[in-house]
Image (tube, rainbow, N blue to C red):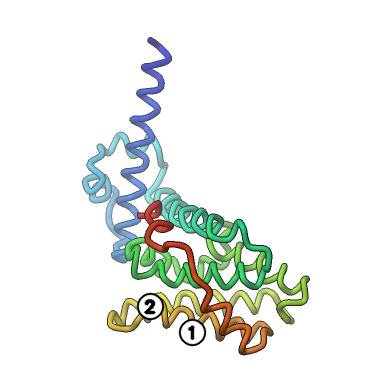
Amino acid sequence: MAETATNRLDRRKARTRAALVSAAQAFIAAGKTNAPILEITQAADVGMGSFYNHFQSKEELFQAAVEDALDAIGAVLDRITEDLQDPAHVFAQSFRITGRLHRRNVELSKVLLHTGTALADSDKGMVPRARRDILAAAKAGRFTIRDADLTMVTVLGAALCLGQYLHDHPNRDDAEATDRVTEDLLRMLGLPAEEAHNICRRQLPDIDELLNGTA
Protein backbone atom coordinates (compact mmCIF):
# COMPACT_ATOMS: atom_id res chain seq x y z
CA MET A 1 0.00 0.00 0.00
CA ALA A 2 2.81 2.41 0.85
CA GLU A 3 4.39 1.80 -2.56
CA THR A 4 1.05 2.46 -4.30
CA ALA A 5 0.63 5.72 -2.39
CA THR A 6 4.17 6.75 -3.31
CA ASN A 7 3.55 6.02 -6.99
CA ARG A 8 0.34 8.01 -6.86
CA LEU A 9 2.18 10.95 -5.28
CA ASP A 10 4.94 10.77 -7.87
CA ARG A 11 2.38 10.83 -10.69
CA ARG A 12 0.62 13.81 -9.14
CA LYS A 13 3.93 15.67 -8.82
CA ALA A 14 4.77 14.87 -12.43
CA ARG A 15 1.38 16.17 -13.61
CA THR A 16 1.81 19.36 -11.60
CA ARG A 17 5.27 19.98 -13.02
CA ALA A 18 4.08 19.25 -16.55
CA ALA A 19 1.18 21.69 -16.12
CA LEU A 20 3.55 24.43 -14.95
CA VAL A 21 5.98 23.80 -17.81
CA SER A 22 3.16 23.80 -20.37
CA ALA A 23 1.76 27.05 -18.98
CA ALA A 24 5.22 28.62 -19.02
CA GLN A 25 5.69 27.61 -22.66
CA ALA A 26 2.41 29.33 -23.54
CA PHE A 27 3.56 32.52 -21.78
CA ILE A 28 6.95 32.42 -23.54
CA ALA A 29 5.25 31.83 -26.90
CA ALA A 30 3.05 34.87 -26.28
CA GLY A 31 6.06 36.97 -25.28
CA LYS A 32 4.70 37.39 -21.74
CA THR A 33 7.87 36.54 -19.85
CA ASN A 34 7.19 39.34 -17.35
CA ALA A 35 4.01 37.67 -16.13
CA PRO A 36 3.94 37.13 -12.34
CA ILE A 37 4.16 33.64 -10.90
CA LEU A 38 0.55 33.86 -9.69
CA GLU A 39 -0.70 34.36 -13.23
CA ILE A 40 1.30 31.36 -14.44
CA THR A 41 0.04 29.10 -11.63
CA GLN A 42 -3.53 30.17 -12.35
CA ALA A 43 -3.08 29.29 -16.02
CA ALA A 44 -1.67 25.90 -14.97
CA ASP A 45 -4.48 25.44 -12.41
CA VAL A 46 -1.82 24.88 -9.74
CA GLY A 47 -1.50 26.46 -6.31
CA MET A 48 1.32 28.84 -5.45
CA GLY A 49 2.59 26.41 -2.82
CA SER A 50 2.86 23.67 -5.42
CA PHE A 51 4.93 25.95 -7.64
CA TYR A 52 7.69 26.18 -5.05
CA ASN A 53 7.69 22.41 -4.63
CA HIS A 54 9.11 22.24 -8.14
CA PHE A 55 10.85 25.53 -8.92
CA GLN A 56 12.68 28.14 -6.89
CA SER A 57 11.90 31.00 -9.26
CA LYS A 58 10.05 31.98 -12.41
CA GLU A 59 13.38 32.05 -14.26
CA GLU A 60 14.02 28.43 -13.31
CA LEU A 61 10.57 27.48 -14.60
CA PHE A 62 11.10 29.29 -17.89
CA GLN A 63 14.47 27.59 -18.31
CA ALA A 64 12.80 24.22 -17.75
CA ALA A 65 10.08 25.15 -20.25
CA VAL A 66 12.63 25.98 -22.95
CA GLU A 67 14.64 22.83 -22.24
CA ASP A 68 11.46 20.74 -22.42
CA ALA A 69 10.67 22.25 -25.83
CA LEU A 70 14.20 21.58 -27.07
CA ASP A 71 14.08 18.01 -25.78
CA ALA A 72 10.82 17.46 -27.69
CA ILE A 73 12.39 18.71 -30.92
CA GLY A 74 15.54 16.69 -30.30
CA ALA A 75 13.51 13.52 -29.88
CA VAL A 76 11.82 14.12 -33.24
CA LEU A 77 15.12 14.78 -35.00
CA ASP A 78 16.64 11.62 -33.54
CA ARG A 79 13.72 9.52 -34.77
CA ILE A 80 13.78 10.84 -38.32
CA THR A 81 17.51 10.37 -38.82
CA GLU A 82 18.31 7.16 -36.96
CA ASP A 83 18.44 5.06 -40.15
CA LEU A 84 20.37 7.55 -42.30
CA GLN A 85 24.05 7.01 -42.99
CA ASP A 86 25.01 10.14 -44.95
CA PRO A 87 25.60 13.05 -42.50
CA ALA A 88 24.71 15.56 -45.23
CA HIS A 89 21.33 13.89 -45.62
CA VAL A 90 20.93 13.79 -41.82
CA PHE A 91 21.51 17.54 -41.61
CA ALA A 92 19.16 18.26 -44.50
CA GLN A 93 16.36 16.07 -43.20
CA SER A 94 16.61 17.57 -39.72
CA PHE A 95 16.45 21.12 -41.09
CA ARG A 96 13.52 20.27 -43.37
CA ILE A 97 11.54 18.85 -40.44
CA THR A 98 12.44 21.77 -38.18
CA GLY A 99 11.16 24.22 -40.80
CA ARG A 100 7.88 22.38 -41.08
CA LEU A 101 7.48 22.38 -37.31
CA HIS A 102 6.78 26.14 -37.26
CA ARG A 103 3.31 25.78 -38.77
CA ARG A 104 2.43 22.43 -37.26
CA ASN A 105 3.26 23.27 -33.66
CA VAL A 106 2.93 27.03 -33.42
CA GLU A 107 3.39 27.30 -29.66
CA LEU A 108 6.57 25.24 -29.67
CA SER A 109 7.84 27.24 -32.63
CA LYS A 110 7.24 30.52 -30.85
CA VAL A 111 9.05 29.28 -27.75
CA LEU A 112 12.08 28.80 -29.99
CA LEU A 113 11.67 32.16 -31.68
CA HIS A 114 11.33 34.04 -28.40
CA THR A 115 14.38 32.21 -27.05
CA GLY A 116 16.22 33.42 -30.14
CA THR A 117 19.99 33.47 -30.34
CA ALA A 118 20.30 32.10 -26.80
CA LEU A 119 19.73 28.74 -28.49
CA ALA A 120 23.28 28.97 -29.83
CA ASP A 121 24.65 27.96 -26.43
CA SER A 122 22.12 25.21 -25.75
CA ASP A 123 23.18 21.58 -25.52
CA LYS A 124 19.66 20.44 -26.43
CA GLY A 125 17.48 20.46 -29.53
CA MET A 126 18.46 21.32 -33.08
CA VAL A 127 21.69 23.28 -32.58
CA PRO A 128 24.00 20.62 -31.09
CA ARG A 129 22.64 18.05 -33.52
CA ALA A 130 23.20 20.35 -36.48
CA ARG A 131 26.76 21.03 -35.32
CA ARG A 132 27.39 17.29 -34.91
CA ASP A 133 26.04 16.53 -38.38
CA ILE A 134 27.92 19.38 -40.06
CA LEU A 135 31.21 18.30 -38.48
CA ALA A 136 30.54 14.67 -39.42
CA ALA A 137 29.78 15.70 -43.01
CA ALA A 138 32.96 17.79 -43.15
CA LYS A 139 35.02 14.87 -41.83
CA ALA A 140 33.46 12.60 -44.46
CA GLY A 141 34.31 15.09 -47.20
CA ARG A 142 30.67 15.94 -47.85
CA PHE A 143 30.75 19.53 -46.54
CA THR A 144 33.45 22.17 -46.75
CA ILE A 145 33.58 24.50 -43.75
CA ARG A 146 36.22 26.92 -42.48
CA ASP A 147 34.81 27.81 -39.08
CA ALA A 148 32.20 25.60 -37.39
CA ASP A 149 31.08 28.38 -35.04
CA LEU A 150 30.38 30.82 -37.86
CA THR A 151 28.69 28.09 -39.88
CA MET A 152 26.35 27.51 -36.94
CA VAL A 153 25.61 31.24 -36.77
CA THR A 154 24.39 31.02 -40.35
CA VAL A 155 22.38 27.83 -39.80
CA LEU A 156 20.72 29.05 -36.60
CA GLY A 157 19.99 32.43 -38.15
CA ALA A 158 18.39 30.72 -41.14
CA ALA A 159 16.26 28.48 -38.91
CA LEU A 160 14.99 31.36 -36.77
CA CYS A 161 14.41 33.78 -39.64
CA LEU A 162 12.62 31.09 -41.63
CA GLY A 163 10.29 30.39 -38.71
CA GLN A 164 9.43 34.06 -38.26
CA TYR A 165 8.95 34.47 -42.01
CA LEU A 166 6.52 31.56 -42.14
CA HIS A 167 4.47 33.05 -39.30
CA ASP A 168 4.49 36.48 -40.94
CA HIS A 169 3.49 35.08 -44.35
CA PRO A 170 0.79 32.48 -43.65
CA ASN A 171 -0.03 32.06 -47.34
CA ARG A 172 3.50 30.95 -48.21
CA ASP A 173 3.93 27.19 -48.68
CA ASP A 174 6.01 26.20 -45.65
CA ALA A 175 7.32 22.95 -47.14
CA GLU A 176 8.44 24.60 -50.38
CA ALA A 177 10.05 27.53 -48.54
CA THR A 178 11.82 25.26 -46.06
CA ASP A 179 13.20 23.00 -48.77
CA ARG A 180 14.53 25.97 -50.74
CA VAL A 181 16.31 27.35 -47.68
CA THR A 182 17.71 23.88 -46.92
CA GLU A 183 18.93 23.56 -50.49
CA ASP A 184 20.70 26.92 -50.25
CA LEU A 185 22.36 25.87 -47.00
CA LEU A 186 23.57 22.62 -48.55
CA ARG A 187 25.09 24.55 -51.47
CA MET A 188 26.73 26.96 -49.03
CA LEU A 189 28.17 23.98 -47.20
CA GLY A 190 29.75 22.68 -50.39
CA LEU A 191 27.33 20.27 -52.05
CA PRO A 192 26.89 20.54 -55.82
CA ALA A 193 23.65 22.31 -56.77
CA GLU A 194 22.05 19.25 -58.37
CA GLU A 195 22.80 17.00 -55.39
CA ALA A 196 21.52 19.63 -52.94
CA HIS A 197 18.32 19.87 -54.96
CA ASN A 198 17.86 16.09 -55.09
CA ILE A 199 18.41 15.65 -51.34
CA CYS A 200 15.73 18.25 -50.64
CA ARG A 201 13.26 16.41 -52.86
CA ARG A 202 13.56 13.11 -51.00
CA GLN A 203 10.42 11.90 -49.30
CA LEU A 204 10.13 12.72 -45.61
CA PRO A 205 8.48 10.62 -42.90
CA ASP A 206 4.91 11.53 -41.95
CA ILE A 207 5.39 14.98 -40.42
CA ASP A 208 2.18 15.21 -38.42
CA GLU A 209 2.79 11.81 -36.84
CA LEU A 210 6.35 12.79 -35.95
CA LEU A 211 5.32 16.08 -34.40
CA ASN A 212 2.34 14.66 -32.55
CA GLY A 213 4.54 14.00 -29.52
CA THR A 214 5.57 17.66 -29.35
CA ALA A 215 2.03 18.99 -29.25
Q: Secondary structure at mark 1?
A: helix
The image quadrant of residue 102 is bottom left
**Few, some or many residues within 10 Å of mark 2 (<14, 14–19, 20+):** many
Instruction: Please indicate whether residue 182 sits to the left or right of residue 195 in the image.
Output: left
x, y (%) of residue 116? Answer: 46, 70
x, y (%) of residue 141? Answer: 77, 76
The one nearer the camera, 71 or 210, is 210
The one nearer the camera, 174 or 112, is 174
Q: How many marks?
A: 2
The one nearer the camera, 90 or 46, is 90
Instruction: Please indicate whether residue 66 sits to the left or right of residue 135 in the image.
Output: left
Residue farthest along the bottom direction in this orientation: 193
Amino acid type at image mark 2: Asp
**Few, some or many residues within 10 Å of mark 1 (<14, 14–19, 20+):** some
Q: Which mark is residue 156?
A: none
Q: Which residue is mark 2?
A: 174
Amino acid type at image mark 1: Arg
Q: Which residue is mark 1?
A: 180
173, above or below 128, in the image: below
Q: Cα distance, mark 2 to mark 1?
A: 10 Å
In the picture, which quadrant includes the N terminus? top left
Residue at image point 33% right, 50% down:
22
